[in-house]
Amino acid sequence: MRHLLVPLAVVALAVGCTPDVAPTASPSVFVSPTASASPSVSPSPSPTAVESFPPAPATESAEQAAIRAAWMEYWRVYEKFAADPSLTDWTETQYVTTEEEAALIIQALGELRDNGWKSLGGRVFRGVAITEVPNQQEAGTAEISYCLDRSGVSLVDAETGTAVTVDVPPTFLETATLRVGLDGKWRVAMIRNEPAAC
């Protein structure tokens, strides 16, 4: 599903869950250590963006590092647009996405803006595992599974800066599917998630 910020619950309901997929032959899984967000030293009237990605495991291959980097770049771009409603050229979102996610990232950011909100970051990613899909039908496909903790996300009214409260679970188990393009670059093709304590 989407990377459920807070206002993206509508997208979550619209896209639904992924259908069951037969397991692949023998995927290679790489899990990175758990990371947690650092507490802020002092409260601030205008929170700053804090994304927390766990470090890559020492055993990560160059290809897995490229997959991880593409996923992290997706989140950097998403947060950039979520934090600044004045950005209107969506081109950068298309550099980090492909297939259905190319439209869904714009839809999600559009819904955020339609509500008059912006997000000031605060996502924490834990338990990141990269799986390259080895079968021929899915060549050039990888999945990244992780816990998305959005309890630290600061959602505010874009004009007043007043905090916005939306009833959305704080944590989700999420899977991002990435595909490699003809240019050799990995991009996010879809994101699916479900609320879960993680």
Image: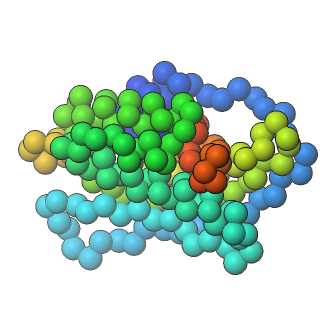
Q: Residue 145: horizontal and vertical position, in percent? A: 64, 51
Which quadrant does the N terminus fall into?
top right
Q: How is the image coloured?
A: rainbow
Q: Nearer the viewer, residue 37 or 143?
A: 143
Q: Image quadrant of residue 44?
A: bottom left
Q: Nearer the viewer, residue 24 or 138?
A: 138
Q: Is residue 197 left or right of residue 90?
A: right
Question: In the image, what residue occupies the spot 44% across and 42% down?
Answer: 94
Q: Nearer the viewer, residue 63 or 81?
A: 63
Residue 173: horizontal and vertical position, in percent?
A: 59, 45
In the rendered view, does 154 fall on the left or right side of 105? left
- Check the image and report above or below for 145 versus 110: below
Q: Is residue 194 above or below residue 25?
A: above
Rendered position, 170 above or below 194? below
Q: In the orientation shown, which residue stands out farthest toward the right?
A: 25
Whether residue 195 is visible, yes or no, is no
Picture residue at 41% right of the left edge, 62% below the top: 51
Relative placement, left or right, of 186 versus 149 is: right
Q: Residue shown at 76%/29% (left/top)?
A: 20
Vertically, is 45 above or below 141?
A: below
In this view, the residue farthest toward the top is 14
Residue 181 shows in this picture = yes
Q: How many marks?
A: 0
Q: Is residue 181 left or right of residue 12?
A: right
| Residue occupying the point 46% across, 47% down | 95
